[in-house]
Amino acid sequence: MTLSQSPATTSGPGQQRSVDAPAANPVPAAWAEYLAAARQLDGVRRDAATAAGEQARTVQAARDELAGVRTRLAPQEARLHELGVPPISLVPTPPELTEATRSMAGGPAAVLTAVRDARRWACAADDTLAARGLPRVAHWPSRPRNLLVYGPLGLLVPLFLAVVHLLAGASPVTVLALVLGLPAPAVAFGLGWLAVGRLFPPRPGERVERTPRFGALVCLIPAVVTTAGIVLAMLAA
């Protein structure tokens, strides 16, 4: 009977094709989503690998810095013991340990920063110990610093000769003083050479910068000029 026929059988040819058409293929969309997720995962993996590598380099740098700080602290501790500093004064107090722990709580980067600060403090302590009470002068260039030692020693005998000549004039006393003053530059240089080593000792592994040629000139020139001036004054008298 025509009344019992379904709409699909009574529809036209165009409507029949639209009902029977297959659904859209989901594979390309799923593949595109898969590629996007794979790219995102690869980016995350690369970022994690970069962060891990940077963290490993930071940790290694902190270890190297720590080794250097320990190398500096060992001779400093021995030196302070020799100077009579009590051992308990060289041990950090609980508040200092707490503050150090708090400053390094930010991870390897914070630890590296703290260790580098400690290295700078250790270097400053080396300079202070090496200077023996002359921390500012110890940072000067070697020649101006050593001039403070060679200069006064080189002027002692010339000043003495000048005073003798002013008091005694062209007399045998002045001649005797000039003869005795001939080795004075060598003596002044030797004393200055020793004093520079005592006042400005080097850091561990370094040599004393005594500037011997400069020191010899500083000790010799005043003596030569003074002696020549006295001799010319005696000959002109």
Image (cartoon, helix red, strand yellow):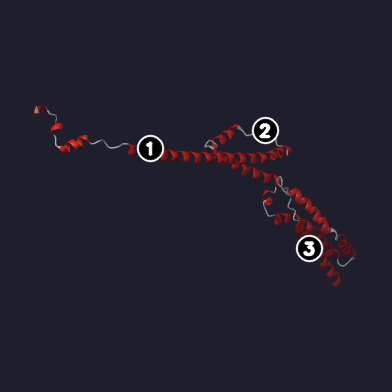
Question: Which residue is located at x 69 percent, y 50 percent?
Answer: 138
Q: Is residue 20 above or below residue 166?
A: above
On the question of residue 223 being in view, the answer is yes
Callout 1: SS: helix
For numbered disc 2, what is the local secondary structure? Answer: helix
Checking the image for residue 88, the label placed there is 2
Dot placed on the residue nearer the N-terminal end, 1 or 2: 1
Residue 159 percent location from the top left of the image? 80, 61
Q: Quadrant of residue 143?
A: bottom right
The dot on residue 34 is 1
The amino acid at mark 1 is: Tyr
Q: Which residue is mark 3?
A: 221
Q: Nearer the viewer, mark 1 or mark 3?
A: 1
Closer to the N terminus: mark 3 or mark 2? 2
**Mark 1 packing: few (<14 Cα in 10 Å), some, or many (20+)?**
few
Q: Is residue 179 left or right of residue 24?
A: right
The extreme bottom residue here reads: 236
The kind of secondary structure element at disc 3 is helix
Q: From the image, which quarter does the C terminus lie in?
A: bottom right
Residue drawn 9% across the image and 27% down it: 1
Q: Is residue 111 left or right of residue 212?
A: left
Relative to 156, is 120 above or below?
Answer: above
Q: Percent position (x, y) of residue 229? A: 81, 68
Q: CA distance from mark 3 to mark 2?
A: 52 Å
Type of amino acid under label 2: Ile
Please name whichever residue, 208 or 133, is drawn nearer the observer in this view of the structure: 208
Q: Mark 1 or mark 3: name the one nearer the start of the chain.
A: 1
Q: Residue at x 46, y 38 (%)?
A: 45
Q: CA distance from mark 1 to mark 2?
A: 65 Å
Q: Judge depth for marks 1 and 2 and give the one in front.
A: 1
Q: Which mark is residue 78?
A: none
